């Protein structure tokens, strides 16, 4: 299938910048929802081509293709798009640490409860059902 170079570059730029891509298995859709320019069929065919070369890994689930770049694919797209070595996809960037604010351990269950646990986990609030009795067969009737 012939795909215009502008559409091919648009798909490759998006895939490289994000590191992942979601493509619905819909061949009649006029556009891809995240990429401006190419049709959904063109994006599907480009993904199929990249997968056969081993540049992406595809997971198919509920009529959607989830596309992940491999290290070989990163190198290929870096050379195709003429990007410097310092540029990496968003999925390969280091995330900043958690923002400072409240301490998560103290406020884990929404405040101080019994021993820092919520009431539904058990404890002294089960006085309504003593341990020495039960019901049904072998309930230990009095």
Image (cartoon, helix red, strand yellow):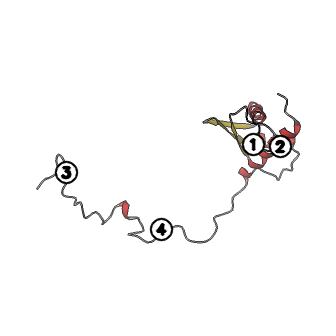
Residue at mark 3 to residue at mark 1: CA–CA distance: 62 Å
Residue at mark 4 to residue at mark 1: CA–CA distance: 43 Å
Residue at mark 4 to residue at mark 3: CA–CA distance: 35 Å
Q: Is residue 138 left or right of residue 19?
A: left
Residue at mark 4 to residue at mark 2: CA–CA distance: 46 Å
From the viewer's side, name the closer residue of 40 and 105.
Answer: 40
User: Residue 1 bears which disc, if any?
Assistant: none
* Label 1 element class: helix
Q: Which residue is mark 3?
A: 135
Looking at the image, residue 141 lies above or below residue 63:
below
* Label 2 element class: helix
Looking at the image, residue 18 lies above or below residue 64:
below
* Mark positioned earlier in the residue sequence (2 or 3): 2
Residue at mark 2 to residue at mark 1: CA–CA distance: 20 Å
The answer to whether the residues at label 2 and label 1 have Cβ atoms under 8 Å apart is no
Q: Nearer the viewer, mark 4 or mark 1?
A: 4
Q: Which residue is mark 2?
A: 10
The residue located at (71%, 43%) in the rendering is 21
The residue located at (54%, 67%) in the rendering is 104
Label 1 crowding class (10 Å Cα cut-off): few <14, some 14-19, many 20+? few
* Mark positioned earlier in the residue sequence (3 or 1): 1
Q: Which residue is mark 4?
A: 110
The x and y percentages for residue 132 are 19, 58
The residue located at (85%, 41%) in the rendering is 9
């Amino acid at each position: 299938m012939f795909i215009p170079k502008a559409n091919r570059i648009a798909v490759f730029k998006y895939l490289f910048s994000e590191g992942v891509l979601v493509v619905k298995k819909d061949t009649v859709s006029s556009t891809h929802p995240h990429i401006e320019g190419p049709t959904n069929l063109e994006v599907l065919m480009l993904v199929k081509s990249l997968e056969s070369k081993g540049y992406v890994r595809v997971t198919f689930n509920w009529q959607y293709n989830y596309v992940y770049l491999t290290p070989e694919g990163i190198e290929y797209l870096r050379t195709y798009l003429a990007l410097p070595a310092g540029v990496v996809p968003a999925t390969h960037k280091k995330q900043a640490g958690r923002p400072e604010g409240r301490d998560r351990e103290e406020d884990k269950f929404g405040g101080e409860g019994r021993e820092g646990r919520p009431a539904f986990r058990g404890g002294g609030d089960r006085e309504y059902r003593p341990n020495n009795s039960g019901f049904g067969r072998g309930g230990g009737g009095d």
